[in-house]
Amino acid sequence: MKHICEIYPKTPSVCNCLNIRRASRAVTQLYDQELKSSGLTIAQLGLLRHPG
């Protein structure tokens, strides 16, 4: 598995909101990369796992 900095190499900002948004985007990209072979994205996986 790649290190998160390899997938989303952004430097921290003084704005905490921006840092949280970047972290969320980085985690999404990390999961999408790991799921690539299955043809699913993390959003699709979340919908499939929803019990509703």
Image (cartoon, rainbow, N blue to C red):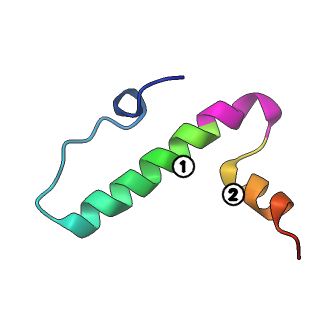
Question: Does dot 1 land on a helix, a strand or a loop?
Answer: helix
Quadrant, the N terminus = top right
Hey, which quadrant is residue 40 in on the image? top right
Rendered location of residue 14, percent (x, y): 10, 60
Crowding near the residue tagged with mark 2, few <14, some 14–19, many ≥20 C-alpha atoms within 10 Å: few
Give the magenta-colored segment's residue range: 33-39
Identify which amino acid the numbered label 2 is placed on: Ala
First reached walking from the N terminus: tag 1 or tag 2: 1
Circles 1 and 2 in contact, beta carbons < 8 Å: yes
Main secondary structure of the magenta stretch: helix
Identify which amino acid the numbered label 1 is placed on: Thr
Query: Circle 1 is placed at which residue position?
Result: 28
Image position of 17 (left or right of 48) = left
Query: Circle 2 is placed at which residue position?
Result: 43
Q: What's the CA distance linking mark 1 and mark 2? A: 9 Å
Question: Does dot 2 land on a helix, a strand or a loop?
Answer: helix
Rendered location of residue 34, percent (x, y): 64, 32
Q: Is residue 35 magenta?
A: yes
Residue drawn at x 45%, y 52% as measured from the top left: 25
Q: Residue furthest right?
A: 52
Q: Is residue 17 above or below residue 9?
A: below
Residue drawn at x 36%, y 61% as measured from the top left: 21
Q: Is residue 39 above or below residue 45?
A: above
